[in-house]
Amino acid sequence: MSDPSQPLLVLGEALVDAVLRSGQTTAEHVGGSPANVAFGLGALGHEVELATWFGRDARGDRIAGRCAEAGVKVTVGSDGAEHTSVAYATLDAAGVASYTFDLTWALPTLGDTGRFGHVHTGSIAATIEPGGTQVLEAVRALHGRATVSYDPNLRPSLMGSPDEVRERVEALVALSDVVKASDEDVQWLYPGAFLPDVLRKWESSGPGLVVVTRGAKGAVYAVRSTTAAEVTSAPARSSTVVDTVGAGDSFMAGLISGLLDAGCLGGVDGRARLHAAGIDDVRAAVERGLATAAATVARAGAYAPTRAEVGA
């Protein structure tokens, strides 16, 4: 059986989101996709360490403070950047965010990683150099003894063309036990592809569970089977949308949390259980992801709900 008490390691960017809404003063929030996942897991009661990269400046102090508030440990050396990165999120009339960035990224030295049962990464950190290659190497080193989750969370304005990042994405998918992507990620990476075909392609390369979120349409997911991937869908939870900042990250945190509670993540035993699971075995974890995402979009910014708020 996997050990749900083992701490989790999150590799990736923590930055400041400067949220721009027409006619309003710019509001700044601590964010970054992997950091948001770490905060979400902390709010759900999991022990988490974040290996990230920020500066010793006022914005970096805000990141350190937010980590402390969320109960997320910061890997020593994560404050080695020349300056703290900023993501400028512009919200349209529906509250949907588009992004531009001023950032720097490298992975601090990790030290002893033997205590971690699960590692999560994704987004900018898995792609932008020099940190992207460092993340890939770290995941390869950890994969033998820890389960892995990955969210591509693609940013075309930073990552160039699909052809430039597809090989890296697919390498991390193959190393992962759980992959979560948005339908926008899939459409950009594989223009014109049929969504279930992409789920089956990714699932066949290594993961035990692949989930594609579709905003208000919910999620489609696939698990490994002895014959072929089982694919099904789940509707989104009803929610008043204030904005979508951090919604995908909140879903990822809820999904990981649900799988940990089910014993389907954490070390080699968790991997074995996930890869033997059927649709019914992972349904509750997907539903937790949908519940956490719904709670997040109902609040401004990348809000991290607690177990009590999502009924977990």
Image: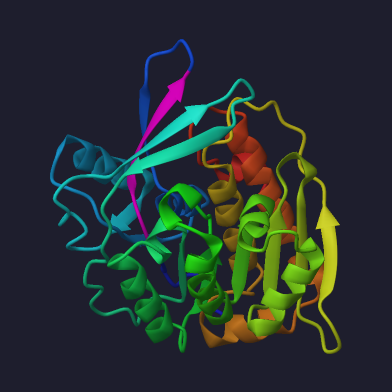
Asked if the stretch drawn in magenta spans residue 211, the answer is no
Q: Residue at x 60, y 82 (%)?
A: 271
Check the image and report above or below for 268 versus 290: below
Asked whether 112 or 108 is in front, the reply is 108
Q: Is residue 283 visible?
A: no
Picture quadrant of residue 244:
top right
Q: Position of residue 77 (x, y in %)?
A: 17, 62
Q: Which residues are magenta?
A: 11-21
Q: Residue sitting at 41 percent across and 57 percent down?
A: 124
Task: Answer left or right for 14 relative to 197.
Answer: left
Q: Is residue 264 above or below residue 300?
A: below
Total numbered labels placed on residues in the image: 0
Measuring from the top left, give residue 248's x and y in whole percent. Answer: 58, 48
For the question of whether residue 236 can be seen, the reply is yes
* Quadrant assignment for the N terminus: bottom right
- 108 to the left or right of 168: left
Vertical placement of residue 236 versus 79, above or below:
above
Q: Position of residue 235 (x, y in %)?
A: 82, 47
Main SS category, magenta section: strand
Q: Tell me if 285 is positioned left or right of 179 in this view.
A: right
Give whichever of 128, 283 is nearer the camera.
128
Identify the residue at horizontal 53%, vertical 51% (top origin). Answer: 44
Residue 16 included in the magenta stretch of the image: yes
Instruction: Look at 29% across and 46% down and name the residue there.
Output: 68
Image location of residue 93, percent across then percent down: 61, 20
- Which is nearer the eye, 194 or 24? 194
The colour scheme is rainbow
**Where is 302 relative to 128, above or below?**
above
